[in-house]
């Protein structure tokens, strides 16, 4: 056992360390940015669900309730209900007059066709619009208003307001007002309740709603004649049912949305021509009220002043407002008739800007959600394809490598060098040496102490002496990082094969012998071993154990068979010494020096293989903070390595196989798919909350079952105990989400040009010899 002392004064920080120091201050903002992106996605999904009445939707409709609290003159009155001076009053449509109304729009297919017909026959109409639809199709609403038609509120999500709280009623009205302001620059005083009909259908539950809205200045509009076009009874029936009896005036109901409306479109021109031929005129609800106002003034001996109906809309709060006379103001010239304002009011100020912001947000949601849906389909296919590839190729790999006649060539029996880079590994280094002391293969051990301050070197020497090991060298160097420590060990290695392991890892007695057998093939330049989680008896440890067995080792079997292994794990890997020196050793250019050198070996023409029988037991991070730190470094380092070797895509010949096969697979399966994989969970939650809980839950369980099958097969191949799979559902709900955030954080760091240094994890030394691990 020899020791090489450190030399000279402390070195200046390396380029990567200086860059890391500058980047450290930027990491917190990047975490915040990742969180904001996730919050924005969630907000967009919630908005989209709300627009479709899937968030907060309530399809309950009251029928058959008592109307004992409703005045008889209201039940028997006309279709227009106002609360002038605080007194409920109804207005009827004059004879030979039709107030043509449409409900449930706008609709991108049917509403423009309705508008075209109205414009052709010079007929105005009143459209009672659903706020969510207004926000989705603002251009149609703008055209509708510019054409001279009138708009009213039909709530934001088409709910029966008699079931809703006062706050929900206010919200339904205010949001629709904002949508109208953003779409057409107006607000309105007209309202029609969803599922309403004639005034005689008002009951004790809906009456307080109308009273409350009347106090806010709204005019509630009902129906005299219903075309029942929503039933699609045929064109002739629609025309028949929409025709008032005996020349009476009527508020007539059609629908321009809410279903297939081709029969409505076909019936409307014939209906208009028929009614005009019968001497009818068409007007809006405001037109009816204006006529009623003029008639009332004439009856009281006053000259009609041309005022038009409705309370002045208060767009800032979404209420109709307390216009002069609309809620009890004095009548003109001391008369008894209230002076009314127009149903439309120009939206200005805060109301206008809030409305435009709502419409803009909806436009983003309308674009984002379908795009995400396409991405979900692509990710779903990629994920399921990966599972299928892993199962098929892993099975082929197992059958190939476990045949009795399979051999790498003549047994490799010559001594090898085992390099152990160590930085503050006082808890683990003795266990590592004890495991190596039991090796069945001749080895020399080189411990490279990378500037430890906890006595790692002294503990190593003491442990080696206690174990009677004479094949141990301890080399001390100033703290230079793991790549430098490994390179130092390679330079000092005595043998042509070097095994690299971490200072917190323990080997089984037969690990080194198994690991070096592939070097019987002269084309093999590096061998990846089978890393196992030793501290698996905690929740975090069990989650990582599942990940190692299922993800890492199934992946390695697949990549091995495809001859494009992307990573030799730092915990257990073996290399030809000359091959390492040929590619320039371990590079400090990236944080994933193991991935970096593996790709370099491929590009140099060496084969890289996987030896599943060579097992190493490593101590996985014991806390979520340490786990985040480790996986962040892994993810970001992998991206660095792939970017560094991007020219491998154009490499020719056998050396270009990694660029042709491995690079696309790693980018797709380890970066692109995991980055977008949260879409599966987001849309699952979206579907559970907004669409069909049972169907979404069944789909989630189906995907989980597929993953369980893959995991169970991986456990079978590695002869692991299945009991850990009981943790898999919880892993999918918690652990996997964290891995998503880590990868997203890494992507943001990469895109913003940050650099990180190798981060030391806190160790406990709880992973002992393999015999103690169950």
Image (cartoon, rainbow, N blue to C red):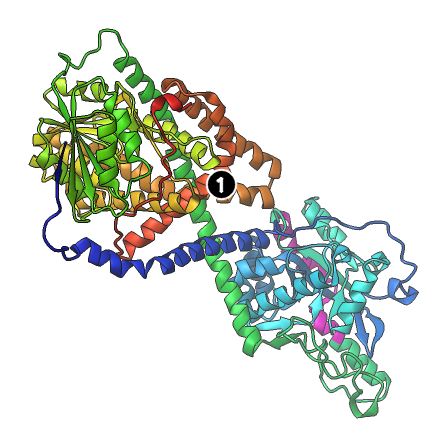
Residue 642 in percent (x, y) is at 22, 42
The front one of 672 and 623 is 623
Q: Which contiguous range is marked in magenta?
A: 263-289
In which image quadrant can residue 676 be found? top left
- In what quadrant of the picture does the N terminus appear? top left
The front one of 530 and 305 is 530
Tag 1 secondary structure: helix
The residue at the point 27 percent across, 19 percent down is 509
The residue at the point 70 percent across, 58 percent down is 274
Residue 477 in percent (x, y) is at 15, 45
**Direction from residue 327 to residue 609 in the image, left or right:** left
> Is residue 282 highlighted in magenta?
yes
Q: Which residue is mark 1?
A: 734
> Is residue 506 highlighted in magenta?
no
**Direction from residue 265 to residue 67 in the image, left or right:** right
The front one of 508 and 711 is 508
In which image quadrant can residue 664 be found? top left
In which image quadrant can residue 84 be found? bottom right
């Amino acid at each position: 056992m020899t020791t090489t002392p450190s030399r000279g004064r402390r070195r200046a920080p390396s380029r990567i360390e200086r860059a890391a120091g500058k980047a450290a201050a930027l990491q917190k903002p990047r975490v915040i940015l990742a969180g904001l992106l996730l919050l924005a996605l969630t907000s967009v999904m919630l908005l989209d669900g709300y627009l479709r009445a899937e968030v907060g939707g309530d399809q309950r409709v009251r029928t058959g309730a008592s109307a004992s609290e409703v005045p008889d003159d209201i039940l028997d009155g006309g279709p227009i209900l106002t609360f002038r001076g605080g007194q409920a009053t109804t207005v009827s449509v004059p004879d030979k007059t039709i107030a043509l109304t449409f409900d449930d729009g706008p609709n991108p297919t049917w509403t423009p066709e309705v508008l075209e017909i109205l414009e052709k026959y010079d007929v105005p109409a009143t459209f009672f619009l659903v706020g969510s639809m207004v926000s989705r199709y603002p251009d149609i609403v703008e055209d509708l208003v510019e054409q001279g038609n009138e708009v009213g509120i039909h709530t934001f999500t088409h709910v029966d307001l008699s079931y809703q709280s006062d706050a929900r009623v206010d919200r339904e009205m205010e949001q629709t007002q904002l949508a109208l302001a953003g779409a057409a620059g107006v607000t309105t005083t007209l309202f029609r309740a969803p599922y309403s009909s004639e005034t005689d259908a008002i009951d004790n539950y809906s009456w307080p709603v109308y009273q409350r809205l009347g106090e806010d200045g709204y005019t509630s509009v009902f129906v005299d004649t219903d075309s029942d076009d929503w039933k699609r009874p045929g064109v002739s029936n629609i025309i028949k049912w929409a025709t008032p009896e005996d020349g009476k005036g009527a508020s007539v109901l059609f629908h321009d949305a809410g279903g297939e409306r081709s029969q409505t479109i076909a019936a409307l021109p014939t209906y208009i021509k028929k009614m005009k031929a019968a001497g009818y005129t068409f007007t809006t609800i405001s037109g009816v009220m204006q006529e009623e106002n003029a008639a009332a003034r004439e009856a009281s001996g006053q000259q009609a002043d041309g005022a038009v109906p409705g309370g002045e809309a208060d767009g800032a709060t979404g209420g109709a407002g307390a216009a002069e006379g609309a809620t009890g103001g004095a009548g003109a010239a001391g008369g008894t008739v209230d002076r009314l304002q127009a149903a439309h009011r120009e939206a200005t100020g805060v109301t206008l800007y809030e409305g435009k912001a709502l419409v803009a947000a909806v436009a983003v949601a309308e674009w984002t959600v379908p795009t995400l849906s396409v991405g979900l389909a692509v990710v779903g296919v990629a994920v399921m394809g990966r599972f299928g590839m892993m199962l098929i190729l892993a099975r082929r790999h197992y059958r190939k490598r476990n045949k009795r006649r399979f051999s790498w060539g003549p047994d490799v029996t010559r001594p090898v060098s085992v390099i152990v880079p160590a930085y503050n590994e006082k808890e683990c280094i003795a266990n590592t040496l004890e495991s190596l002391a039991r090796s069945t293969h001749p080895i020399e051990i080189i411990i490279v102490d990378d500037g430890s301050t906890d006595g790692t070197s002294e503990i190593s020497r003491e442990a080696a002496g206690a174990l009677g090991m004479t094949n141990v060298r301890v080399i001390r160097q100033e703290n230079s990082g793991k790549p430098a420590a490994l390179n130092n060990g390679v330079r000092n290695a005595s043998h042509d094969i070097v095994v690299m392991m971490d200072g917190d890892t323990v080997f089984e007695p037969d690990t080194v012998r198994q690991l070096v057998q592939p070097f019987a093939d002269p084309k093999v330049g590096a061998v990846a071993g089978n890393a196992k989680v030793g501290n698996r008896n905690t929740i975090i440890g069990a989650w990582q154990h599942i990940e190692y067995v299922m993800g890492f080792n199934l992946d390695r079997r697949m990549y091995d068979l495809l001859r494009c292994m992307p990573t030799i794990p730092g915990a257990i890997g073996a290399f030809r010494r000359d091959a390492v020196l040929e590619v320039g050793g371990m590079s400090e250019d990236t944080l994933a020096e193991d991935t970096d050198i593996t790709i370099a070996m491929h590009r140099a023409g060496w084969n890289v293989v996987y030896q599943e029988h060579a097992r190493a037991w490593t101590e996985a991070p014991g806390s979520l903070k340490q786990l985040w730190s480790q996986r962040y470094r892994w993810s970001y380092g992998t991206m660095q390595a792939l970017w560094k070797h991007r020219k491998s895509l154009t490499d020719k010949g056998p050396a270009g196989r990694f660029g042709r096969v491995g690079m696309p697979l790693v980018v797709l399966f380890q970066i692109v798919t995991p980055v977008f994989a949260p879409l599966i969970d987001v849309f699952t939650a979206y579907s559970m909350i907004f669409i069909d809980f049972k169907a979404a839950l069944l789909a989630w369980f189906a995907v989980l079952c597929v993953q369980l099958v893959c995991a169970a097969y991986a456990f079978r191949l590695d002869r692991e105990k299945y009991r850990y799979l009981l943790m898999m559902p919880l892993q999918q709900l918690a652990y996997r989400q964290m891995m998503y955030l880590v990868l997203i954080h890494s992507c943001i760091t990469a895109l913003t040009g940050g650099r990180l240094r190798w981060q030391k994890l806190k160790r406990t030394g709880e992973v002992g010899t393999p015999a103690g691990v169950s």
